[in-house]
Image: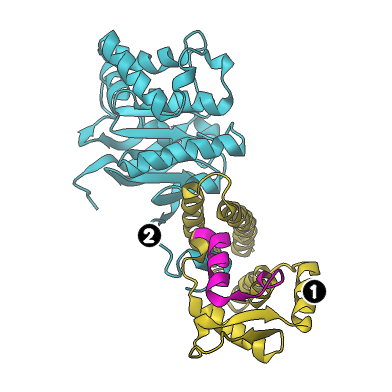
Chain colours: A yellow, B cyan
Amino acid sequence: MQDAVLAMLAKQPAHGYHLHALLRRALGPLGESMNRGQIYVTLSRAERAGLVVCERTEGLPERPERKVYALTAAGHQRVAAWLAEVGRPKPDLAEFHLKLFAAAAARLADPVELVAAQRRELLRRLREAHQAALAEPAGSGAGLLLEGVVLRLQADLRWLESCERAWSTVDDEAEDG
Amino acid sequence: MNEPNAVLRARGLTRTHGQGQSRVLAVDEVSLDVPQGQTLAVTGPSGCGKSTLLHLLGGLERPTGGEVWVAGRRVDTLSERALARLRRRSVGFVFQSFHLVEELSAAENVELPALLAGRSRRQARRRAGLLLDRVGLAERARHLPSQLSGGQRQRVAIARALVNDPLVVLADEPTGNLDSAATLEVLRIFEELRAGGQTLVIVTHDDRVAATADRLISMRDGMFVDDTWLAGAHPRGLGGLIGLEG
């Protein structure tokens, strides 16, 4: 989140509320839960870290909405590094995979049941993302993001199918033996 | 267990295929209530019995055991004639391979079941015009199926399924032959139907299609192994989908 906020300051200094509006527009319905306060907190952290400086409007009482933020040289460097960075896959796949192994090894829970519960959760999210995607007008930026969310969830669900197949056979073999 | 307003009800529904050694239990004693206005998706690997279940619910196949009720009326014991009338008037079918009459135009395909159900030519034509407009094909009404894309053909088939105001629409892999853009078109129409309170049962192996439903049943080896309610907003809100906590 901090990186994205900083990147939006790369072109020119801006008020916190302007950054909030930009993020909201880029995220569409996905950004509805984002508060302006989160942006101010992010900005004041970045200020303490020397990534932004804040210019106050003269003669007015000090309030967050009156501050204009600008990137420092360190801030510009940070944004360049962020843009050049290749995102790594999230660790949650490996974590879930290890959870299934641990559950089976310790006989704490049935891995097939864990997979089913995970699947239900992902399907609920898929339903939400799909409905939000349908509600977006064609060509909207948020629609594009939602399409990405939908495709990722579909990929995760396919992987869960493989997990289910694999762990069901482990079960059968154990019973046969 | 007994839903007073169930449009579809099954009790101990069973269907076997084949004889002797090669006898297969396609559907194995399943029970189900689908209330008015619900969209239900049934998923599972191929051969799990989901299509057979749909055929049994819509009276396209007869069960080997158990009962099927449509809007409070027992249908597995009906005569062939009465069953054909039920299929025409109360159930709308959508198939994977569209099943349109190739010699008839889009509009005529939609009109056909209305005429068979005893409506006048004028009524049938008006109703077909309305429905083709609703699925976004008003301009293609005079086209033959061969002049339409797969997605357009399936939209004609959906209009046809709706022409007699069915109590329930049963769709068997409705997007199985469609690319992702055409799939979205069909899902958009299903979403409108859902919002309009149409009872809908969709058999699919596509998770995105399944996720459009209010409720999801998973089948394995002819049995229901999971029955999940999908509707209702996520507690963390949409932002939770991308890791922005609300």
Q: Closer to the camera, B137 or B4?
A: B137
Name the residue: 53% across, 48% down: B208
Q: Position of residue A101 (x, y in %)?
A: 65, 72
Residue B1 position, x and y percent, is 24, 53
Residue under circle 2? B232
Q: Circle 1 marks a residue in which chain? A: A
Decide if residue A108 is in sight here: no
User: Element under label 2?
Assistant: loop
Q: Whole-Å distance between the Cαs marked 2 and 1?
A: 40 Å
Magenta range is A8-28
Question: For the stretch drawn in magenta, what is the main secondary structure?
Answer: helix
Q: Residue at the spot x=50%, y=49% of the render?
A: A136
Residue A135 in the figure: left or right of residue B130: right
Viewer-proximal residue, A84 or B2? A84
Quarter of the image with the N terminus of chain A in it:
bottom right
Disc ID at residue A81: 1
Pointer 1 local density, CA inside 10 Å: few below 14, some 14–19, many at least 20: few
Residue B138 image-quadrant placement: top left
On whether residue B156 falls in the magenta region, the answer is no
For the residue pair B224 and B151, the one nearer the viewer reads as: B151
Look at label 2 and name its amino acid: Gly
Q: Name the kind of residue labelled 1 in the image.
A: Ala
Check contact, mark 2 vs mark 1: CB within 8 A. Answer: no
Residue shown at 23%/36% (left/top)? B71
